[in-house]
Image (cartoon, rainbow, N blue to C red):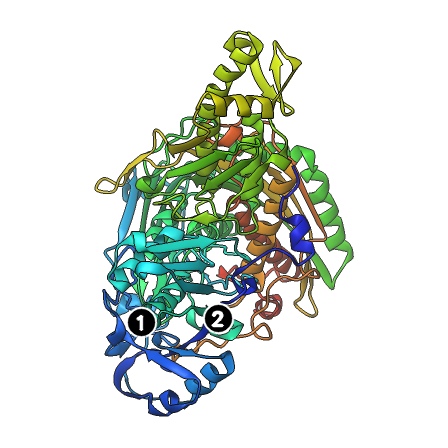
């Protein structure tokens, strides 16, 4: 099945929040935010702004009838600042006016006096000052401290991975409309409709059933709209509660960049020990996560860093600790990979460091330490259906790594100005929300009298084509043509208490629920068809919009069965609930079985560095990926390619920069660079590895949203190898992104 949104997307007909027709009495909102990163609010003068013609009202924390709190995991983030501000861009007030122009003019008329306090911008500084979001977490396996004494090689080092801006095409936004009896409808650009509903109800001081959240689709999310879509929707809801008029708020790009959190920067310190035969015997890491000024999702992201700290390798003695460090930056948040990429970068850096100092190729260490069946992860889960070695050796054979290495060596001997590098990047990524209670979903299926079908789930479509996969599931089970199926918007009144569309789990959770609901409906309809055809139920199936008997098409159509079902008063609506079985995790012991399954893969990345300029090109990324039994290979390969580009951007060019006062410097697309068509790999080749699939995945088709992002880490090490080829005196550094400036300095250091 093709992406069901493609037609309307390319014609510009797909609807987003900003495309909705506004009611005639609708107003426009705009946030007034802090111009300082940390300080006490001495006074704010709204008088000139309030006097401006067209300004209806300016809302502050004083107008909150419920609780001025939007923190999810930890209640440490006010909707609007009260006495202090803790980051540059923190919301202080919400201007509601007749037009955007008036609201902007009013914002410029507000004056604020802030008594500045010390500003912390880095995780290292936060740790030195004991500034933390919560208590640290640690995973342990074996006895790492004792095992280092038994190692032939022991190396220590430091890494840094910078943040990353989500840069979704559609900025944050919401359109709030008052309904009768104090009810409010929020059309929000959010990955978490229930989180918006729950938080809005808490802030407004009303029950959740009075808030309806509707999501048509998102113009991109990447995790940036999992929790951080919430405040803007709640602000509009507060305004509607007081004014009883519709209010719309769409952030412009500069406001969105300034006020929202990014991927977490990490400063990390590792110690790695290897035996003489290159087996990694011991590994220790201290991760310092730059959480920003409030928790947001940082504790959960920190946890996933620990889960993925050893990537695709079995290490018998592991000790990893993560500190969520509180700084004066916007609260950092979910981003594709959710802490996993930061953890994987550290282990890959440690292996590269060890290989360089031993004097061997990095892949030699990687290969002999790959996960095998029944190996234990540091969090207690036993690895099963392991494809780490399968993808690794398939990649080496399929893409003829030996020939690629020979070509690289030959090229480097013949060229002085240009040098090539090659790296292998294996990935192992767990699929499930690590918070076990979030792994559930529901689906509501209506079959209408004419045989058409409406499907409601908790899945939010944000470009990953989850709606297409939901239709595929329904079509497969019901045996009807796609034209008879419609995916409804994601709405809290139809499917309640949903988990956010995140963690690469959306298709699995919601797809399983759709499958269950459709199977129940088919069971009922099979009974009806049996009476119509005078056949036994076991011989009946539904295919191609008809009843099939013993595999042969009958004259009884789908519509005939539905009509008869109406006559017999058979229920044509079904609600199904799916909760992932088996998974569990005990945080008191930091042990359990948190993941339904793992996704595996290996990428071979080839780069060419211009050693005069410090620029580079990604020649090719050749991937063997574990799709399971892909239900839609076209969509899945598209996800691999998109995630790869995003990962390469994070590792090579996307550089978040704040000054010492906590002000964002990379605040525009002139100062923050993302991959364009010229910076993507010249060749991307993706080959599915042959596997049996996994029963925990929907139709054995494994999750594909997040895992491929980590392939982008390979670009860092391929570039680094090329630099080392040009300058043997270059000392490996693990400070991403590896921008052309850093490459240029590395090419000529110590010469």
Q: Which quadrant, please, contains the C terminus?
A: bottom right
The disc, 2 or 1, on the residue closer to the chain's N-terminal end is 1
**Quadrant, the N terminus:** top right
Q: Which residue is mark 2?
A: 251
In the displayed structure, 680 sits above or below 562; it is: below
* Label 2 Cα neighbours within 10 Å, binned few <14 / some 14-19 / many ≥20: some
Q: Position of residue 631 (x, y in %)?
A: 59, 32
For label 2, the SS is loop
Left or right of residue 732: residue 234: left
Residue in front for this viewpoint, 50 or 242:
242
Where residue 616 sits, quadrant-wise, is bottom right
Numbered label tally: 2
Q: Are marks 2 and 1 in contact (CB under 8 Å)?
A: no
**Of residues 359 and 471, the one drawn nearer to the viewer in this rendering:** 471
Q: Residue at x 40, y 33 (%)?
A: 575
Q: Residue at x 60, y 75 (%)?
A: 670
Identified at 67% across, 56% down, the residue is 680
Between circles 2 and 1, the one closer to the viewer is 1
Q: What is the crowding at mark 1: few (fewer than 14 residues within 10 Å), some, or many (at least 20)? A: some
Q: Which residue is mark 1?
A: 242
Residue 690 x/y as whole percent: 60, 27
Q: Is residue 41 left or right of residue 270?
A: left
């Amino acid at each position: 099945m093709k992406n069901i949104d493609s037609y309307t997307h390319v014609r510009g007909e797909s609807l987003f929040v900003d495309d909705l027709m506004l009611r005639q009495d609708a107003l426009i909102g705009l946030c007034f935010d802090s111009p300082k990163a940390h300080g006490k609010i001495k006074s704010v003068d709204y008088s000139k702004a309030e006097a401006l013609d067209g300004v209806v009202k300016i809302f502050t924390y004083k107008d909150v009838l419920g609780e001025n709190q939007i923190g999810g995991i930890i209640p440490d983030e006010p909707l609007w600042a009260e006495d202090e501000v803790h980051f540059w861009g923190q919301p202080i007030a919400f201007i509601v006016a007749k037009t955007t122009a008036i609201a902007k003019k009013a914002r410029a008329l507000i004056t604020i006096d802030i008594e500045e306090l010390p500003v912390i911008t880095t995780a290292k500084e936060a740790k030195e000052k004991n500034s933390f979001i919560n208590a640290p977490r640690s995973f342990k396996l074996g006895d790492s401290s004792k095992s280092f004494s038994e190692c032939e090689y022991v190396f220590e080092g430091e890494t840094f991975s910078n943040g990353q801006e989500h840069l979704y095409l559609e900025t944050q936004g919401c359109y709030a409309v008052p309904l009768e009896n104090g009810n409010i409808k929020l059309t929000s650009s959010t990955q978490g409709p229930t989180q918006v509903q729950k938080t809005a109800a808490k802030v407004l001081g009303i029950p959740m059933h009075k808030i309806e959240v509707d999501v048509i689709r998102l113009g991109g999310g990447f995790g940036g709209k999992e929790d951080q879509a919430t405040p803007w929707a709640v602000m509009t809801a507060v305004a509607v509660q007081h004014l009883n008029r519709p209010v719309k708020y769409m952030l412009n790009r500069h406001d969105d960049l300034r006020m929202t959190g990014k991927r977490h920067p990490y400063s990390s310190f590792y110690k790695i020990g290897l035996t003489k035969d290159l087996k990694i015997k011991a590994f220790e890491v201290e991760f310092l996560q730059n959480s920003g000024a409030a928790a947001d999702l940082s504790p959960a992201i920190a946890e996933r860093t620990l889960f993925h700290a050893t990537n695709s390798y079995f290490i018998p003695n592991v000790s990893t600790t993560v500190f969520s460090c509180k700084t004066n930056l916007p609260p950092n948040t979910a981003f594709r990979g959710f802490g996993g990429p930061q953890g994987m970068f550290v282990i890959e850096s440690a292996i590269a460091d060890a290989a360089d100092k031993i004097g061997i190729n990095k892949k030699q260490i990687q290969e002999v330490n790959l996960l095998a069946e029944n190996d234990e992860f540091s969090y207690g889960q036993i690895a099963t259906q392991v494809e780490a070695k399968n993808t690794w050796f398939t990649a080496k054979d399929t893409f003829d790594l030996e020939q690629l290495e020979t070509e690289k060596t030959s090229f480097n001997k013949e060229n002085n100005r240009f040098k090539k590098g090659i790296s292998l990047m294996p990935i192992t990524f767990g699929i499930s929300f690590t918070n076990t209670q979030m792994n559930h979903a529901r689906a509501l299926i209506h079959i209408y009298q004419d045989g058409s079908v409406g499907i409601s789930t908790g899945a939010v479509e944000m470009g990953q084509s989850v709606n297409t996969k939901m239709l595929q599931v329904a079509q497969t089970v019901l045996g009807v043509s796609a034209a008879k199926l419609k995916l409804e918007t994601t709405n809290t009144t139809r499917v309640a208490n949903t988990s956010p569309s995140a963690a690469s789990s959306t298709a699995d959770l919601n797809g399983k629920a759709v499958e269950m609901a459709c199977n129940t409906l088919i069971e009922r309809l099979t009974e009806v068809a049996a009476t119509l055809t005078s056949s036994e139920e076991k011989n009946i199936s539904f295919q191609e919009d008809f009843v099939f008997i013993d595999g042969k098409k009958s004259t009884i159509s789908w519509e005939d069965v539905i009509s008869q079902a109406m006559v017999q008063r058979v229920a044509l609506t079904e609600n199904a609930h799916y909760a992932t079985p088996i998974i569990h995790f005990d945080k008191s012991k930091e042990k359990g079985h948190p993941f339904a399954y793992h996704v595996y893969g290996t990428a071979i990345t080839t780069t060419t560095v211009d050693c005069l300029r410090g620029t580079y090109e990604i020649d090719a990324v050749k991937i063997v990926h574990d799709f399971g039994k892909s239900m839609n290979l076209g969509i899945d390969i598209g996800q691999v390619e998109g995630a790869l580009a995003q990962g390469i951007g994070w590792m090579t060019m996307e550089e978040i920069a704040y000054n010492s006062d906590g002000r964002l410097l990379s605040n525009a697309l002139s100062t923050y660079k993302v991959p364009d068509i010229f910076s993507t790999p010249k060749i991307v080749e993706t080959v599915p590895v042959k596997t049996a699939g996994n029963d925990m995945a929907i139709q054995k088709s494994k999750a594909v949203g997040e895992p491929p992002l980590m392939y982008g880490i390979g670009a860092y090490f391929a570039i680094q190898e090329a630099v080392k080829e040009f300058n043997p005196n270059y000392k490996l550094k693990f400070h991403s992104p590896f921008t052309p400036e850093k490459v240029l300095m590395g090419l000529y250091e110590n010469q």
